[in-house]
Image (spheres, rainbow, N blue to C red):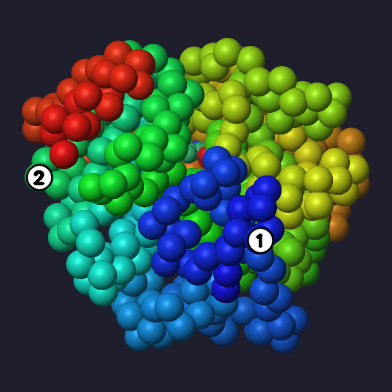
Amino acid sequence: MLYTSLKDKNHKINFEKAIIKGLPPDKTLYIPNKVPIIEKKWINNIEKYSKNEIALKIIKPYIEKEISKNKLISILNKTLNFSLPIKKIHDNIFTLELFHGPTLAFKDIGAKFMSGCLEYFYKKNKKPITVLVATSGDTGGAVIKAFHNIKGINVIVLFPSGMVTGIQKKQLTTLTGNVVAIEIKGTFDDCQKIVKKVFLDKSLHKKKIFTSANSINIARWLPQMFYYFYAYKQIKKFNKKIIISVPSGNFGNICAAMLANLMGLPICHFIASTNVNDTIPRFLKTGKYIPKKTIKTISNAMDVSNPSNFIRIMNLYKNNITNIKKKLSSYSFNDKETLKNIKKVFKKYRYILDPHGAIGYMGIKNYFKNIEKKNKIGIFLETAHPIKFIKKMPNITKKYIIMPKNIKNILNKSNKYIILSNKYKEFKNWLLKNN
Ligand SMILES: *Cc1c(COP(=O)(O)O)cnc(C)c1O
């Protein structure tokens, strides 16, 4: 598979180069230059295949022979070593729980897969790589965990002051060695801007190879398609039309969902559910793309006002908004509604939504308001474990939220990190001194 820039169809590179470069020279994003189609027969038999077999089938066409089949299987084995169950909430609404991984967020899968690929390419080329990441909360922890102690690779994570939770901060700052966390006095968008500037700053690239592990990197982005095949595998038996709601921030996950659909996965409709950072719901309504200042919410991993991956969705649909709207709806919800629904779902169904999952849940409910539901099943993704947001959770749920063991272990460790302003120059100086 070759990858092209969104803007320049003549700029084509392979998987290895696309993941190591992260971004094309024209500042847009890489996108596969064709969509591989999965045979109907295989999809109809999906129940027969294991999690890892499904992952291999989906990802192989994007990598082809660049990583050998056996090596790819071993990377997938290390990536997918936890469960991804579907649970019924009530009536025709289900959730796909993606938070059983090492940092309790769905990003563990993309991060681990990417670390496996980069480790493989480092062993082949022997050229050390620095991974740079901007995080609104969950990405950083997942990336640090996934890359910790991987030889030949250094990781630098930028997180915004005061916007990550206590547990997220522990996950970001308690591992050391080849990983370092930097608190930026600013927003997630400021962090993202700094990362983008590093990639465009040629003066830095003479000595070092930089790549990003944000969802803009294809190795983080593509494996997210697995979730939707897993959801389908577990829900297919009901023989109903499937609608999936994805709590969305940077829109990588929903974009992977829509790519899975174009590959042949029968999903009838998608919902991008956002918090009050509602650039996309407004865009789909008005056709005008106007990001506002980022607003801080209790679903902090989605506090993104200028979602990087949305242009990939536009590209997959040939920049035709009308066609996008046939497949994708988008709704936004505020913190008050989020808390109300967490309480309601707990009281009525004894299920504890985290603030992100709650937004996904409300997206499905909203979609079902005005349509015939009988022949449909709605699935929302539970993207993180509620323990990560325990301070923000409604009191009635608190004593029922059980602390997983791997979180308990990091709570007593001390936070080690660096603080910098949101000025690119300051970051660059630090980078030149310390790398
Ligand atoms: C990152 C994240 C999201 C948003 O995913 P995107 O791919 O950026 O849209 C949602 N929920 C949680 C818990 C996250 O960590």
- The three-letter code of the residue at mark 1 reads Asn
Please name the residue that numbered disc 1 is placed on. 10
| Above or below: residue 151 compared with residue 57 | above
Residue at point 9%, 32% (across, down): 413
Please name the residue that numbered disc 2 is placed on. 177
From the top left corner, tell me how far across and down residue 264 is, in percent: 73, 70
From the top left corner, tell me how far across and down residue 189 is, in percent: 48, 24
The reply to whether residue 338 is visible in this rendering is: yes
CA separation in Å, label 1 and label 2? 40 Å
- The three-letter code of the residue at mark 2 reads Gly
Q: Which quarter of the figure has residue 181? A: top left
Label 2 packing within 10 angstroms: few (<14), some (14-19), many (20+): few
Front one among 327 and 348: 327
The reply to whether residue 355 is visible in this rendering is: no
Which quadrant, please, contains the C terminus? Answer: top left
Q: Please, what secondary structure does the residue beneath circle 1 have?
A: loop
Q: Within 8 Å of ligand 1, the CB of disc 1?
A: no
Q: Which quarter of the figure has residue 433? A: top left
Residue at point 20%, 67% (across, down): 126
